[in-house]
Image: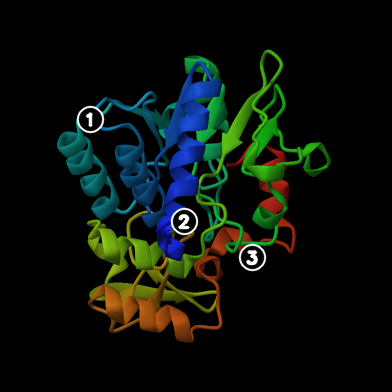
Amino acid sequence: MSKYNLDYLDELEAEAIYILREVAGQFEKPALLFSGGKDSITLVHLAMKAFRPGKFPFPLVHIDTGHNFQETIDYRDDMIKRIGEKLIVGYVQEDIDNGNVIEQKGKNASRNALQTVTLLNTIAKHQFDACIGGARRDEEKARAKERIFSVRDEFGQWDPKRQRPELWNIFNGKIHKGENVRVFPISNWTELDVWNYIRRENIPLPTIYFAHQRDCITRNGQLMAASEFLNMDSDDVIENRNVRFRTVGDMTCTAAVESYAFEIDDIINEISASKISERGARMDDKVSEAAMEDRKKGGYF
């Protein structure tokens, strides 16, 4: 008998597609959370493999802080036109205007934490019972505690003690009314796995992932893109630097790294040599040692 061998990217792809189909089979109203970053873009590509030639059995959901990189928004809109799927956008600005959240003040103010409220409101409004996301276990130690099917209570809160066993790739999506499940199909992938898959599949990405010249300021030891969303003062010196972004989020909390990686192969070589994780460029993770876990317990993705 002939032996059929998959390489490791084929195995990761097959597992992710299986998980996406499990979500479609187990839940009534799932959604795919789309940030415009490489991980959620990879999820969209995997969903196309899982469900084409049919339509996705779920909409894409983007929580827009209003302080996004324009390149990310442009990519999102172009992608939606290209794939012809439904997009739902939750706006943090609407929650600010309605008094649901209070915008932070001060030099390091950010809307990143506020998007949790908008996410939970969007889930409640559309009655989503499962939200698919691109979180990976290698990103941050709190993410490593989470299962692929992660149950959240009726308040959207995560309790690490309520994690369910997932033996033999059997996923339990049973929930009570009001609860929802966060699902992470690429939880077993690493940052390098994602980039190798993007290279193999020739997946287009927003230009900010590649080295380019940008006006930046140095804040708290990190290179931040100079923008109207940063509360800059006379102490902030704008410098034009050659940078790229390893992770994509709100402009007020996402730092750049100096880079001359203009092609995917350059990026892969750069990441292989780096001793800092990609979330090392996220200011919001530096609030405390347990910053991510605290946010997840409050409903953050």
Residue with the mark numbered 2: 11
**Labels 2 and 3 touching (C-beta < 8 A):** no
| Residue at the spot 33% in from the left edge and 56% down from the top edge | 228
Quadrant, the N terminus: bottom left
Residue 165 in the image: state x and y as whole percent: 76, 41
Question: Is 99 placed left or right of 201 in the picture?
Answer: right
| Residue at the spot 23% in from the left edge and 48% down from the top edge | 75
Of the two numbered discs 2 and 3 on the same chain, state the one appearing first in sequence: 2
Q: Residue furthest top?
A: 177
| Residue at the spot 39% in from the left edge and 83% down from the top edge | 270
Q: Nearer the viewer, residue 237 or 259?
A: 259
Count the marks.
Answer: 3
Residue with the mark numbered 1: 53
Of the two numbered discs 1 and 3 on the same chain, state the one appearing first in sequence: 1
Mark 2 vs mark 1, CA separation in Å: 22 Å
Query: Can you see residue 211?
Result: yes
Mark 1 vs mark 3, CA separation in Å: 43 Å
The crowding category of the residue bearing disc 3, from other C-alpha atoms within 10 Å (few below 14, some 14 to 19, many at least 20), is few
The crowding category of the residue bearing disc 2, from other C-alpha atoms within 10 Å (few below 14, some 14 to 19, many at least 20), is few
Q: Nearer the viewer, residue 131 or 299?
A: 131
Query: Helix, strand or loop at disc 2?
Result: helix
Instruction: Nearest to the eye among marks 1 and 3: give it.
Output: 1
**Labels 2 and 1 touching (C-beta < 8 A):** no
